[in-house]
Image (cartoon, rainbow, N blue to C red):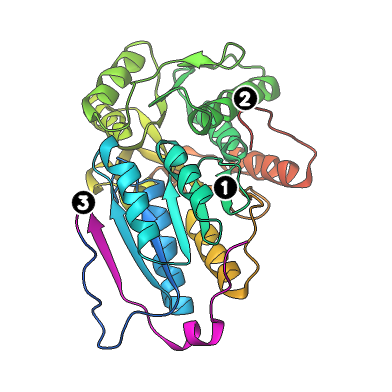
Amino acid sequence: MPRTPHLIAALALAGASAVVLAGCQAAPPTQTDAATDVCARMVTNSGGLEDRSFNQSSWEGLKAAESEYGISAEALVSTGETDLAPNVQQAVDSGCELIVTVGWELAEATADQAGKNPDLAFAIVDETVEAENVKPVVFDTAQASFLAGYLAAGVSKTGVVATFGGGNQPPVTLFMDGFVDGVAAFNAAHGTQVIALGWNKAAQDGAFTGDFEDINKGKVLTEGFIDQGADVILPVAGQVGEGAAAAAVERGGVSVIWVDSDGYETMPAEFRPVLLTSVLKNTQQAMVEIVGDVLDGEFTSESYVGTLENGGVEIAPYHDLASLVTPELDAEIEALRQQIIGGELVVESPSRP
């Protein structure tokens, strides 16, 4: 178990925060006093801190915990694969009580350092590492993606929707499983035949760009889907998804469903007119809870699993495209949400946490 911090001292002091680039030393504290007794270090994956995804939302969660509990938080930004292990080492060397790593790329380095430092608390976002001092922070995004797929089928005018991923990995394909199941559920309820391109759930294979950073790949792939008639696109590919939004803006009559964060709030304003909704991971809430557990000496390796029931996953408001969603469709989606929360409807996926 990790060492228990001094709760009273932690709550009494305000923490300074800084973002640390890969290979750089931490910036000096911005306050006149020394750093707080309790601190956290976060290591991003290669997507960077402002990825409009779970690097950004995890950091926002630590900032919220900093304000709420008076801890000190810093982020070490990885710009490539060679930064990952050294950044985790640097985070450990900081002496902080909590080390947060983000994404599957950091699983190996996290497991290695957790084994060498059994008295430290580690949390890894969007990935699972099995160790007594590592808490996986994962999300059953299939639940919310099911609602998004039902929505997509309900607003599609062409009867064709699509999804693609950055890589064939469980945190990605979990979205895609839920999405195509939601489309199928709409078809079953309405006797329609809306087609979902880009993912075959039975085969667990589909369309992938091969990375999470090359925006042009997302644009090219989306243009291909649009050429096949798709008018609602779900990219599960980090920054690559911006290419899907760009294609939707250029072509017209196409909408996009963002993932992880509310794209309407985090993406450039030029994309707002095409954003139908977003499948949300409330990583912020998880970070605040984990920091609280560390402070209270209640940190465990039990996974934090975000669901519709606990608010860990959700779909965002329809924003500028609310007029596309009829009151009847919205009511159906709400009924499905309640069925999933109540356990009457289980969204299955081999990637489910």
The residue stretch that appears in magenta = 1-24
Of callouts 3 and 2, the N-terminal one: 3
Q: Amino acid at mark 2?
A: Asp
Query: In the structure shown, which secondary structural element does the residue marked by tag 3 occupy?
Result: loop
| Mark 2 or 1, closer to the camera | 1
Residues under labels 1 and 3: Cα distance? 26 Å
Marks 1 and 3, the one that precedes in the sequence: 3
Q: Residue 199: where, in percent of width, then height? A: 50, 17
Categorize mark 3 by other alpha carbons within 10 Å: few (<14), some (14-19), many (20+).
Answer: some
Residue at 65% from the left image edge and 27% from the top image edge: 349
- Residue, x 58% and y 73% (percent of image)? 4
Q: Which mark is residue 181?
A: 2
Residue 332 location, x and y as percent?
66, 39
Residue at left 59%, top 37%?
A: 147
Give the percent coordinates (x, y) of residue 169.
48, 26
Is residue 281 in view?
no
Q: Which part of the image, by quadrant, shows the N terminus?
A: bottom right
Residue at mark 3 to residue at mark 2: CA–CA distance: 44 Å
Checking the image for residue 23, the label placed there is 3
Mark 1, mark 3: which one is toward the viewer? 3
**How far apart in space, not on screen, are marks 2 and 1 (Cα)?**
26 Å
Q: Is residue 306 something that shows in the picture?
A: yes
Q: Which residue is mark 1?
A: 136
Q: Tag 2, which secondary structure?
A: helix
Q: Is residue 8 a member of the stretch shown in magenta?
A: yes
Q: Amino acid at mark 3?
A: Gly
